[in-house]
Image: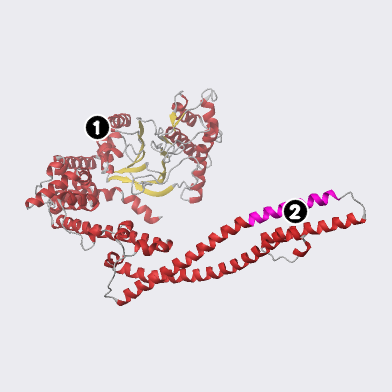
């Protein structure tokens, strides 16, 4: 009995690798076009012999390759050495599939136990090493975008063992390339795509990836059957019923062919006409006598799937909508409502003003209008509150910073009568504290003026003393060479005078008292006495200044305390502001006289209401969409804002949802059951792992 086999490679982007069939192995690899879109511009002058460089870099650790494998690798790398710059995806798929085939057919993993995680980890490391080495040899760089990777690719293979009436299929994969079995009872998935909910691949080969995981499942499949390894270009064109699409395409091609060569040509031609990506398949059968026997055994399943696909085509308009998620079905209406929002709101406001009943004017939508009115009022009140708080903050800062300006400029000059006696007392106490602090500050200013005058006098005294010191130093220097005893005594006298004037100069700096004035000549004592009296006055002044500062600090503390007490009334009662402050202060700090006795008006005009709707767009858009969904069997004043066909599909979805058609529902259930059949083997295998 002959095992029929074939493979095809429908190249559009040239990112898939040529699939492999040999011995007991089927392998497919798909370079990832998005993340692997970087084009590697190789310096052909530096790497003159590209074939040798690639064989050394990617496969240098693969000794004694057989002629058959060498020929296969030569076909794989042909696009890489043709002189054209290629993508990272193209290089990746070819390097990975070649290393995988070598490892499992001629390398150390030929008879490896693939159910052992450690073995698969070592196999993944061996395969990935070729990517790392290639990057090193050619100094490859990532693209400029964050999602771009170096040499990214999927890998999927089946290692099979034939038994008497069945086939043991060990399936290993990383990424979204798939492994299938086709049996007389239908197509069966043998792998599970490594994807997250968004469809992004979560597990793949790429350079420097240390987290690659080779998934493993073991299946025992009753013969006759067909095993396949395929890239995503084989099933993506049929999403979301991709497995049904693959089975229909495969069975149609088998029923219309008379040999495996003709089958490969037919599949190749079909995917050339429909694909948006490369499509590859490696295919081997078990338990069929010949191709005619295969067609005969699969005929019942073929007839069933052809009929099912025909019914699906007939029901396509309804199924196109029915099979969508609610989010997908509503996507157009949601986005269009957001895009045409201003026009839609205008139409709804017109209808509300006319009192027109409309499917879009639900209680929820009208409630949004009321909420907008309330929001407008709340926003007005909030803005007014914020304005008042800013004004109070400005007032507080000014009063604490400029107490001397408070009574004449800030507080009202009118005679006030207080119904609240505690407020009156607080007002009186604060004014008294302000007057006291201003008086103490005035004293402080007097001390500051005196201190400034003293500094001037001190400088003048210093200059006169320096003149004396200069005068006596010259006199002393002139006596230096005179030796008679009387002259020596005179030098000592002059030196004593110099020392006295030095101490007098220091006393000006530090306010010391003077005790050596008697050593000065009588002609100098007048200036020395003036300095002594000046220093004495400064000491007295400093003592008085310190005492005055203590009094001022106490006045400041009392002022702050009395203001804090009065300021609480300002914060609690808005009317206090307009009673206690002068008109100039009210204007200065931004208290709004126009709102003195007013409340925000809940009524808003058409423009303000439209603006409020615009501000609430994120809330209103879903309300409008829900209204159209609930009233899917009626027209609306806003219909003209949508594409008629797409709005019709939206309404069809909700009509079917609200009033399900048994025929469509039953057929949808049949498709779901079929999908469960497609995944039954992998579900069972996962439970056993």
Q: Residue at x 32, y 74 (%)?
A: 424
Q: In this view, does 256 lie above or below 186?
A: above
Left or right placement of residue 334 versus residue 164 in this view: left
Q: As drawn, which residue projects farthest toward the front? A: 523
Residue located beneath label 2 in the image: 469
Residues under labels 2 and 1: Cα distance?
128 Å
Residue 38 in picture, x, y percent from top left: 43, 33
Asked if the residues shown at circle 2 and circle 1 are in contact, with their CB atoms under 8 angstroms apart, the answer is no
Q: Which circle's residue, 2 or 1, is located before the other in the chain?
A: 1
Residue 55 in picture, x, y percent from top left: 53, 30
Q: Residue at x 78, y 58 (%)?
A: 497
Left or right placement of residue 532 versus residue 542 in this view: right
Q: What stretch is highlighted in magenta?
A: 458-479
Magenta-highlighted stretch: main secondary structure? helix
Label 2 Cα neighbours within 10 Å, binned few <14 / some 14-19 / many ≥20: some
Give the total of numbered labels: 2
């Amino acid at each position: 009995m002959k095992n029929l086999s074939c493979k095809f490679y429908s190249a559009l982007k040239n990112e898939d690798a040529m699939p492999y069939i040999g011995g007991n192995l089927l392998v497919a690899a798909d370079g990832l076009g998005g993340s692997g879109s970087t084009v590697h511009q190789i310096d052909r002058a530096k790497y003159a012999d590209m074939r040798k460089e690639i064989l050394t870099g990617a496969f240098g650790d693969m000794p004694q390759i057989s002629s058959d494998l060498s020929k296969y690798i030569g076909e794989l790398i042909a696009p890489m050495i043709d002189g054209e710059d290629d993508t990272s995806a193209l290089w990746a798929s070819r390097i990975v599939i070649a290393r995988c085939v070598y490892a499992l057919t001629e390398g150390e993993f030929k008879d490896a136990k693939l159910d052992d995680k450690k073995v698969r980890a070592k196999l993944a490391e061996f395969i990935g090493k070729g990517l790392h080495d290639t990057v090193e040899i050619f100094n490859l760089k990532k693209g400029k975008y964050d999602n771009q990777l170096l040499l990214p690719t999927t890998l999927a293979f089946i290692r099979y063992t034939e038994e008497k009436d069945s086939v043991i299929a060990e399936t290993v994969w990383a990424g979204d390339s798939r492994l299938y079995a086709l049996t007389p009872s239908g197509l069966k998935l043998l792998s599970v795509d490594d994807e997250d909910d968004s469809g992004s691949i979560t597990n793949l080969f790429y350079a420097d990836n240390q987290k690659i995981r080779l998934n493993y499942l073991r299946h025992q499949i009753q013969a006759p059957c067909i095993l396949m390894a395929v890239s995503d270009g084989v099933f993506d064109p049929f999403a979301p019923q991709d497995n049904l699409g693959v089975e229909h395409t495969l069975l149609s091609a088998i029923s219309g062919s008379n040999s495996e060569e003709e089958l490969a040509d037919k599949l190749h031609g079909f995917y050339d006409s429909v694909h948006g990506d490369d499509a590859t398949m490696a295919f081997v059968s078990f338990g069929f006598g010949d191709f005619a026997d295969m067609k005969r055994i699969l005929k019942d399943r073929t007839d069933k799937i052809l009929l099912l696909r025909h019914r699906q085509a007939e029901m396509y308009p309804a199924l196109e909508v029915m099979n969508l998620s609610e989010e997908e079905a509503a996507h157009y209406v949601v986005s269009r409502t957001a895009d045409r929002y201003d026009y839609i709101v205008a139409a709804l406001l017109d209808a509300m003003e006319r009192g027109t009943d409309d499917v879009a004017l639900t209680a929820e939508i009208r409630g949004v209008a009321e909420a907008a009115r309330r929001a407008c009022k709340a926003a007005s009140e909030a803005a007014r509150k914020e304005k008042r708080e800013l004004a109070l903050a400005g007032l507080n800062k000014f009063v604490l910073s400029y107490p001397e300006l408070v009574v004449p400029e800030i507080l009202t000059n009118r005679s006030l009568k207080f119904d609240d006696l505690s407020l009156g007392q607080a007002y009186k106490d604060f004014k008294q504290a302000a007057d006291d602090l201003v008086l103490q500050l005035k004293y402080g200013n007097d001390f500051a003026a005196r201190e400034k005058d003293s500094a001037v006098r001190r400088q003048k005294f210093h200059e006169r003393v320096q003149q004396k010191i200069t005068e006596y130093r010259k006199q002393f220097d002139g006596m230096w060479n005179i030796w008679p005893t009387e002259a020596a005594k005179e030098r000592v006298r002059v030196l004593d005078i110099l020392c006295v004037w030095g101490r007098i100069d220091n006393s000006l700096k530090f306010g010391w008292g003077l005790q050596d004035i008697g050593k000065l000549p009588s002609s100098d004592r007048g200036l020395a006495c003036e300095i002594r009296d000046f220093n004495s006055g400064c000491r007295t002044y400093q003592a008085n200044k310190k005492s005055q500062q203590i009094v001022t600090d106490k006045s400041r503390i009392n002022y702050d305390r009395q203001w804090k007490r009065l300021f609480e009334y300002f914060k609690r009662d808005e009317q206090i502001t307009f009673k206690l402050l002068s008109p100039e202060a009210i204007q200065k700090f931004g208290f709004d006289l126009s709102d003195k006795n007013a409340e925000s008006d809940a009524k808003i005009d058409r423009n303000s209401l439209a603006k409020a709707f615009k501000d609430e767009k994120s809330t209103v858009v879903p309300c409008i969409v829900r209204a159209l969904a609930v009233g899917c069997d009626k027209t609306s004043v806003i219909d003209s804002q949508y594409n008629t066909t797409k709005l019709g599909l939206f309404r069809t979805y909700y009509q079917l949802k609200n009033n399900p058609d048994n025929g469509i529902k039953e057929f949808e259930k049949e498709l779901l059951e079929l999908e469960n059949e497609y995944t039954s083997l992998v579900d069972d295998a996962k439970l056993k792992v």
